[in-house]
Image (cartoon, rainbow, N blue to C red):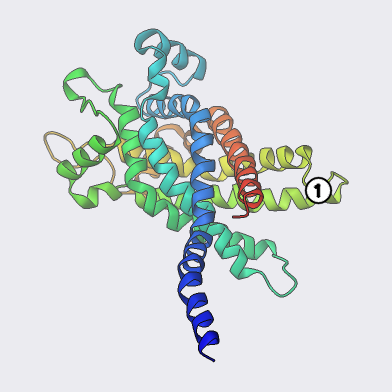
């Protein structure tokens, strides 16, 4: 009896910390996987993202919207480093936003699965929209910093804030606009993220099923790349208008005379843009946006799959 009690106590004290650590890791794993996947994709796509922001800013200010012209001018005037301006903010955003977006999506889909482990497209849609919206609000301060860092070099020299990095951009924004200023544009950002997540994750699942039904081998490179490219198109199409409005709101500055912002909100901003250039103005830079979103989606999804395999091979 005494020996049994000692064995029982030994199991209790030696097993609990390990079990607790594994439970914590199990809960964190989808978020860590999402963060790593997003960071890998961002390092590859950052130059295209920089050109996309310049196109949107150029469209709003009547400048060039040609990706080739903008890229040439950036290289000539600012050097190759200009394409990676705001990378620290981009990676910070991926750690928070993509980590939460993919992590929450994994958690939500696991909870939504029935006894047959099947997921209807309606359930996938709800999971994707919810994960995208929540993650976007969490990642908004880093997203705002990224846009401001990218737009800063286009300002007249006397108006530049000359951010030194993501922390400087965050603290400068908080000082100038208050803590709430870090969440400026969070409504259009969340709406865009919901649209993007719906297109990326929802249509990725749907495209994989359709390709499999057409005879494409499950888990093959053809299925993964094909589904990702299709998902990238729908993610781009649904999210670009919100992305365009978000960029205009986040870079907006108060009028020095009246102290008012040029827009009363996302809807007012969208209406003003449509008045100036018609509905298609909201899809300014679609080819570049697609070139950025589709590969980012593909790299993220492929990286996520491989990181999951890595954890499995490590027994984690």
Residue 194 in sight here: no
Q: Secondary structure at mark 1?
A: loop
Q: Residue furthest right?
A: 215
The residue shown at (67%, 37%) is 229
Quickly name the residue at label 1.
218
Occupied quadrant, residue 125: bottom right
Image-based side of 138 in relation to 260, left or right: right
Q: How many marks?
A: 1
The residue shown at (72%, 41%) is 224
x%, y% of residue 28? 48, 58
Q: Residue furthest bottom?
A: 1
* As drawn, 64 above or below 105: above
Residue 94 in sight here: yes
Question: Which quarter shows the C terminus?
Answer: bottom right
* As drawn, 136 above or below 90: below
* Nearer the observer, 204 or 16: 16
x%, y% of residue 247? 38, 37
Q: Residue furthest top?
A: 76
The residue shown at (26%, 23%) is 155
* Nearer the observer, 244 or 105: 105
* Nearer the observer, 15 or 128: 15
Callout 1 crowding tier (Cα within 10 Å): few <14, some 14–19, many ≥20 = some
């Amino acid at each position: 009896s005494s020996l049994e009690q000692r064995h029982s106590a030994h199991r209790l004290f030696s097993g609990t910390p390990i079990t607790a650590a594994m439970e914590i890791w199990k809960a964190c794993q989808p978020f860590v996987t999402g963060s790593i996947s997003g960071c890998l994709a961002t390092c590859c796509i950052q130059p295209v993202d920089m050109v996309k922001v310049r196109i949107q800013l150029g469209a709003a200010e009547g400048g060039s919207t040609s990706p080739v012209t903008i890229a040439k001018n950036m290289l000539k005037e600012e050097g190759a480093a200009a394409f990676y301006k705001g990378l620290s903010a981009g990676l910070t955003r991926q750690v928070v936003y993509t980590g939460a977006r993919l992590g929450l999506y994994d958690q939500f889909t696991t909870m939504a699965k029935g006894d047959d482990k099947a997921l209807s497209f309606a359930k996938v849609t709800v999971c994707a929209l919810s994960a995208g919206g929540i993650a976007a609000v969490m990642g908004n301060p880093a997203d705002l910093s990224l846009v401001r860092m990218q737009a800063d070099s286009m300002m007249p020299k006397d108006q530049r804030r000359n951010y030194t990095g993501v922390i400087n951009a965050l603290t400068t924004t908080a000082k100038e606009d208050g803590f709430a200023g870090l969440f400026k544009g969070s409504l259009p950002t969340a709406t865009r993220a919901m649209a993007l997540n719906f297109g990326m994750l929802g249509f990725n699942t749907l495209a994989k099923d359709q390709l499999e039904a057409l005879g494409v081998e499950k888990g093959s490179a053809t299925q993964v790349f094909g589904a990702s490219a299709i998902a990238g198109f729908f993610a781009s199409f649904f999210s670009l208008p919100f992305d365009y409005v978000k960029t205009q709101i986040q870079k907006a500055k108060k009028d020095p005379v009246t102290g008012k912002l040029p827009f009363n909100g996302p809807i007012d901003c969208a209406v003003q843009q449509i008045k100036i250039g018609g509905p298609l103005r909201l899809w300014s830079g679609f080819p570049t946006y697609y070139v950025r979103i589709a590969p980012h989606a593909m790299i993220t999804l492929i990286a996520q799959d491989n990181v999951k395999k890595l954890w499995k091979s490590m027994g984690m």
